[in-house]
Image (tube, rainbow, N blue to C red):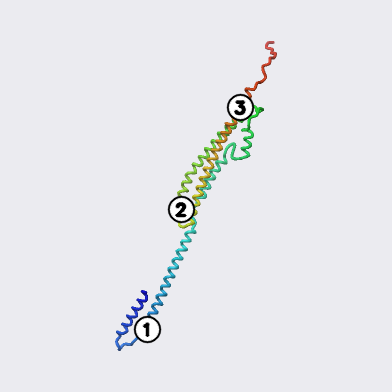
Amino acid sequence: MKIRHLAAASAVMISIAATAVPSSAQIVVFDPNNYVQNVLTAARALQQINNQITSLQNQAQMLINQARNLASLPYSSLQQLQQSIQRTQQLLTQAQRIAYDVQQIDRAFSTTYAPVSASTSSQTLISNAQVRWQTSVAAFQDALRVQAGVVGNLDTNRTQMSALVTSSQSATGALQATQAGNQLVALQAQQLADLTATVAAQGRAASLEAAQRAAAQDQGREQLRHFLTPGVGYQSTSVQMFH
């Protein structure tokens, strides 16, 4: 409407200017309707160009947003988390004597921790008791070493958590936010792995100590039975004391 009013006003001004020309001057032929149509056509073309520019700007912004959503997170905590898990796993594999091996456990409980028989010698009983005690002490040492390793990983976990939360808050797109969330989940998985290792080490130490007490009780009962079992009485023999 504004364009049409502008065109109509221009036509009126040109008509007035044409009537004000002296009769002696040369009269220029001017068609107001044609001029108005030309102005309207130019205005429509300009409006179409503006619409196309706006559409291109919207498409460009859409592409920028898509690029942001597809941008990968520049920070990764995978290596640090894997190193923490490897440190804890190495401590578990360094378990002394009876380690986390089913065959080794079965072999120990069929020999050292086996029930005492009547034919077992006193020397064997003493040797097995000493081995069981040493195994219990070693298991407690292993549990403390695993706990120390887990505590050492806390500083790494704190650093990674701070970096991942910062990355998540400053994420420019959906992909970066998702990747930051996935790495936070990986951090939780690493902490759960440390917790599992600690529980396993403590459980191993407690189980070996309980097995050592049970074996000691069985051995004590057998030794008491040996002591109370009536033996051969005193028998006199001839002894030559003086030549």
To which quarter of the image does residue 50 belong? bottom left
Mark 3 residue element: helix
Q: Position of residue 164 (x, y in %)?
A: 47, 51
Label 1 is placed on what type of residue? Asp
Q: Amino acid at mark 3?
A: Arg
Residue appearing at x 51%, y 39% in the figure: 147
- The CA distance from mark 3 to mark 1 is 130 Å
Between 214 and 175, the residue placed more toward the observer is 214
Give x and y (percent) for residue 112.
62, 33
Disc 3 or 1, which lies upstream in sequence?
A: 1
| As drawn, 3 above or below 168 | below
Quadrant placement of the C terminus: top right
Crowd around label 1: few <14 · some 14–19 · many ≥20 (10 Å): few
Between residue 149 and residue 185, name the one nearer to us.
185
Please give the name of the residue rendered at 49% of the width and 52% of the height, measured from the top-left corner.
181
Please give left or right for residue 109 compared with residue 202 in the image: right
The residue pinned by badge 2 equals 168
Quarter of the rendering containing residue 221: top right
Q: The N terminus appears in which quarter of the rendering?
A: bottom left
Cα–Cα span, label 1 and label 2: 67 Å
Q: How many marks?
A: 3
Q: Which residue is mark 1?
A: 31
Give the left or right position of residue 18, taking residue 208 as reference: left
The reply to whether discs 2 and 3 touch (Cβ–Cβ < 8 Å) is no
Closer to viewer: mark 2 or mark 3: 3
Label 2: few (<14), some (14–19) or many (≥20) C-alpha neighbours in 10 Å:
many
Q: Which disc, if any, is residue 221?
A: 3
* Residue type, mark 2 in image: Ser
| Front of the two marks 3 and 1 | 3
